[in-house]
């Protein structure tokens, strides 16, 4: 079977750190081109400054991995889907829920695969955590996602702009895990969003959810963390505590700890290949819906200005 010819659009941090090695490490794909307005591209791979240039003058591609900021993703995705190109959307899949819905409808109409990728769901501890929790009664959940924005998002202006999600850019990863491993759906009860007075997106947030069985779920997001970083989910159950740490890579169960390999992006590309070969899409907007609800229902507080 011929490899799927794929272009990366948006050659920023995540494209270089994860997409390039994951594509090169998967024989189902060949990296046909890269696209970015200000990037020089990769040695030996055709590089174009825009998606228009790729579609008009570039090599033929079967698929695109869209790794731009979310605010510009819809227009690019709709253009490529219209050409019958399979689409991998980095998280979050869009800047609004409605635009993701229209992309799904268009992909279905054209008959191509649309993949809304949630990389954290492919962390090593997540599948076994989901299996273990399926049998348990959940008493409560604590999510602590605290990181240093200056380390992880230096100079990324888009992340502070409307649609950039602020601290929910990493926080949505925690929600992508929680919505996947917890056996019951959950919904927002109360939220406080803390915004620097010179920015349009929150630097911290405190959220209270409840699942349909009544279990409380507390989420603490903060971008002002220095020193050790925290990406932890602890679930209290009738059989003891499950804890996922390091973003889902490490799974602690009563009596055991498993340290997993870094398998998120290889897992995403295996899934994308299977979707394309099987003529299917995978578009789960639940994590984005919970974030949208936080912006809909949360109260805003203002804090000190943030400077990079
Ligand atoms: P980034 O470093 O700012 O990169 C974004 C890239 O998109 C830039 O290289 C920019 O190109 C390009 N771009 C912007 N508009 C474009 C357009 N119209 N056409 C083509 N390219 C365009 O951001 P990032 O950290 O990689 O994040 C990108 C997405 O991946 C976000 O949704 C984020 O949530 C997600 N993500 C990031 C991480 C992470 O650790 N950083 C992890 C997982 C997922 P120029 O620089 O050439 O202008």
Image: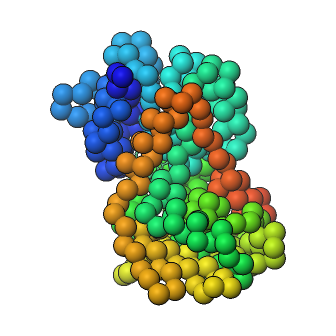
Residue 198 visible in rendering: no
Ligand 1, by image quadrant, is top left
Outermost residue, front side: 135
x and y percent of residue 29 in the render?
35, 31
User: From what the image shows, is residue 1 above or below residue 132?
Assistant: above
User: From what the image shows, is residue 112 above or below residue 266?
Assistant: above
Query: Viewed as shown, does residue 264 lie left or right of 209?
Result: left
x and y percent of residue 284 in the render?
65, 47
x and y percent of residue 77 in the render?
55, 29
- Quadrant assignment, res 106: top right
What residue lies at 44% left-to-right and 83% top-to-bottom?
A: 256
x and y percent of residue 145 in the render?
52, 73
Quadrant where the N terminus is found in the figure: top left
What residue lies at 50% left-to-right and 74% top-to-bottom?
A: 244
- Quadrant assignment, res 84: top right
Number of numbered discs on residues: 0
Colour mode of the rendering: rainbow
User: From what the image shows, is residue 65 above or below residue 91?
Assistant: above
What residue lies at 53% left-to-right and 51% top-to-bottom?
A: 118
Comparing 261 with 117, the one in front is 261
Comparing 274 with 212, the one in front is 274
What residue lies at 60% left-to-right and 87% top-to-bottom?
A: 240
Outermost residue, top side: 56
């Amino acid at each position: 079977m011929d490899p799927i010819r794929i272009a990366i659009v948006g050659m920023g941090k995540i494209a270089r750190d994860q997409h390039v090695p994951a594509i090169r490490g998967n024989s189902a794909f060949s990296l046909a081109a890269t696209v970015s307005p200000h990037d020089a591209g990769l040695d030996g791979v055709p590089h174009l400054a825009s998606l228009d240039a790729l579609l008009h003058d570039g090599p033929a591609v079967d698929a695109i991995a869209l790794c731009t900021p979310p605010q510009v993703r819809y227009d690019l995705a709709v253009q490529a889907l219209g050409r019958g190109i399979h689409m991998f959307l980095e998280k979050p899949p869009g800047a609004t829920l409605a635009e993701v819905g229209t992309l799904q409808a268009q992909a279905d109409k054209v008959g191509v695969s649309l993949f809304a990728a949630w990389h954290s769901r492919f962390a090593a501890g997540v599948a076994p955590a989901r299996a273990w929790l399926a049998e348990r009664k959940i008493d409560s959940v604590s999510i602590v996602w605290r990181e240093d924005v200056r380390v992880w998002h230096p100079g990324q202006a888009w992340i502070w702009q409307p649609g950039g999600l602020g601290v929910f850019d990493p926080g949505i990863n925690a929600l992508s895990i929680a919505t996947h491993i917890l056996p019951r759906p959950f919904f927002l009860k109360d939220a406080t969003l803390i915004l620097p007075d010179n920015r349009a997106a929150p630097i911290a947030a405190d959220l209270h959810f409840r699942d349909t069985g009544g279990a409380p779920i507390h989420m603490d997001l903060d971008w002002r963390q220095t020193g050790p970083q925290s990406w932890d989910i602890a679930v209290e159950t009738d059989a003891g505590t499950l804890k996922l740490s390091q973003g889902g890579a490490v799974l602690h169960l009563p009596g055991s700890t498993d340290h997993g390999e870094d398998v998120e992006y290889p897992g995403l590309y295996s899934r994308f290949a299977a979707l394309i070969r099987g003529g299917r899409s995978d578009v789960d907007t639940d994590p984005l819906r919970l974030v949208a609800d936080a912006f809909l229902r949360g109260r805003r507080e203002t804090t000190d200005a943030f400077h990079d």
